[in-house]
Amino acid sequence: MPTYRDEVVVLRTHKLGEADRILTLLSRRNGKIRAVAKGVRRTSSRFGARLEPFMVADVQLYQGRNLDIVQQAESLGAYGADIAVHYDRYTSASAMVETADRLNEAESTPEQYLLLVGGLRALSRGEHASRSILDSYLLRAMALSGWAPGLADCARCGAPGPHDAFVAQLGGIVCSSCAPTGAARLDGTTIGLLNALMAGDWDDVDAAPPGAEAAASGLIAAYAQWHLERGIRSLEHVEGLR
């Protein structure tokens, strides 16, 4: 059976036997991979620390019948340690890798891999508020999967904006004619923040008032979970920080 190399982000790990782990990896070229890392739980393991959640590595794998086998691993981004010591970074990173796992169930793209790596790098460095990095990641990851929210014209009928109602089930911002009773109403500051998060305009994101941040976060979480068709469990802990 052939061997191959790829760059990967470690999404999840599970114990196997006394010393092994099953890894769920998001790779740059081969999509999502499930592999066994033998002996990584032993203190003598040569690359155990390189295969923890949130770590980015260059790995060589042996193609197995059911699960591939990790033969080598070289660290490309040791983000796990800096993320794990800050609760807000850890919970945000957990929500990001859980979302990546769900979104790339069938297939992945290099853009999804690079977006996740960039988000984890930003979290590890504390470049911006952890929740803002998560919100930006969720919006952009959904867009790469074909579910970009409408943030200008009506997402349902296409009526030119601006509009002030947001409905996750209808695809984003909608006009007053399409908005159902009880739809969330947004002010211009929150709409501007949503657009800044989507575009990665961090000067505007960092300057946003707390009220707009909280409103945008709630809408983004609802939108992502609606399209994923099930809840993101890690978001419960992120919401607790609010």
Image (cartoon, rainbow, N blue to C red):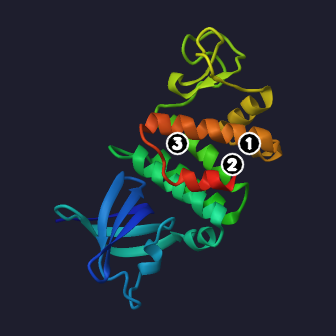
Residue named by callout 3: 141
Q: Earlier in the sequence, mark 2 or mark 3?
A: 2
Amino acid beneath label 2: Ser
- Which residue does the image show at 69% across and 33% down from the upper left? 195
Residue 26 percent coordinates (x, y): 41, 56
- Depth check: give the residue in front, 46 or 130: 130
Instruction: Say which element carries label 3.
Output: helix
Residue 158 occupies which quadrant of the picture?
top right
Q: Dots 3 and 1: beta carbons under 8 Å?
A: no
Q: In the image, which disc is placed on residue 132? A: 2
Q: Residues within 10 Å of mark 2 (few under 14, many from 20)?
A: many
Q: Earlier in the sequence, mark 2 or mark 1?
A: 2
Measure the alpha-carbon separation of dots 2 and 1: 8 Å
Q: Dots 2 and 1: beta carbons under 8 Å?
A: yes
Residue named by callout 1: 213
Residue 79 percent coordinates (x, y): 58, 68
Measure the alpha-carbon separation of dots 3 and 1: 19 Å
Q: In the image, which disc is placed on residue 185? A: none
Which residue, as the protein is rendered here, is positioned at the far bottom? 44
Q: Is residue 167 left or right of residue 194?
A: left
Residue 148 occupies which quadrant of the picture?
top right
Residue 232 percent coordinates (x, y): 48, 48
Amino acid beneath label 3: Ala
Amino acid beneath label 1: Glu
- Which residue does the image show at 38% across and 69% down from the upper left? 59
Res 139 seen here: no
Comparing labels 3 and 1, the label whose residue is closer to the camera = 1
Instruction: Say which element carries label 1.
Output: helix
Q: Is residue 149 above or below residue 43?
A: above
